[in-house]
Image (tube, coloured by chain):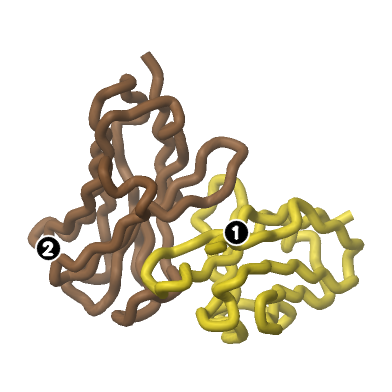
Amino acid sequence: QVQLQESGPGLVKPSETLSLICSVSGDSIRSGYYWGWIRQPPGKGLEWIGSIFRSGTTYYNPSLKSRVTISVDTSKIQLSLKVNSLTAADTALYYCARTYSSVWPDGFDVWGRGTLVTVSS
Amino acid sequence: SDELTQPPSVSVSPGQTARITCSGDALPNQYSYWYQLKPGQAPVEVIHKDTERPSGIPERFSGSNSGTTVTLTISGVQAEDEADYYCQSTDSTNTYVLFGGGTKLTVL
């Protein structure tokens, strides 16, 4: 049973960089899937941030691409997300998720419970 | 335009059928997916590639595709189905993931 667990600072200041980790259990980052990040601002809908394959191939939401970096650490079985130049608009529940297959694009069949990030001074 | 449009809310009584639509110009050429979101829980994929039901999803959940509109149908709605539902697809280049705005299903 694959499980994903997001972790992060909870509160970050405007203009700073957010770093989140997604720990994977029951599977390997090296497996043939895409891994991604999705966020949900309070009271709003889901927004796809980006996704990465084990080879390093990445796809980013064009509206966030200039501020976002997604990477995988296969030795630690972790997925990471960095978002720089934070503003209050980045306040959201951040989810990590795994796609159904190795073919892009695809649906996300496994999700974490999410970690809440608040951007405030 | 590459957007997915859902109704903000749908209300049904227990045992009735709920239909949640998702409209977008790119849908005729892209697969759609549906997710159920409940507070404090991990989102759950309830429909895969327009019509497939993932393992463990009750048979009352079904999906259909009619060109620029895809529909999630929940037959015999139960109280536990009350949740937010989101459709997902991709843009016209088949590269970027899009989500609909979400629909709150209320079971009266």
Using the image as rendered, state which of residue B62 and residue B50 is in the foreground: B50
Residue A98: x and y, percent? 35, 67
Using the image as rendered, state which of residue A83 and residue B36 is in the foreground: A83
Residue B21: x and y, percent? 73, 68
Disc 2 versus disc 1: nearer the observer: 1
Using the image as rendered, state which of residue B3 and residue A53 is in the foreground: B3
Q: Residue at x 52, y 51 (%)?
A: A46
Q: Quadrant of residue A109?
A: bottom left
Q: Residues within 10 Å of mark 2 (few under 14, many from 20)?
A: few
**Where is the C terminus of chain B found, in terms of image quarters?**
bottom right
Q: Quadrant of residue B106?
A: bottom right
Q: Position of B73 compared to B46: left or right? A: right
Q: Residue at x 35, y 62 (%)?
A: A3
Give the chain letter at badge 1. Answer: B
Q: Which residue is mark 1?
A: B100
Question: Which secondary structure lies at badge 2?
Answer: loop
Residue A100: x and y, percent? 39, 77
Q: Residue at x 75, y 57 (%)?
A: B7
Whether residue B55 is visible here, answered yes or no, is no
Residue A15: x and y, percent? 28, 23
Q: Which residue is mark 2?
A: A74
Question: Which secondary structure lies at badge 1?
Answer: loop
Q: Colour of chain B?
A: yellow
Q: Quadrant of residue A73?
A: bottom left
Q: Is residue A28 positioned above or below A38 on the image? A: below
Give the chain letter at badge 2. Answer: A
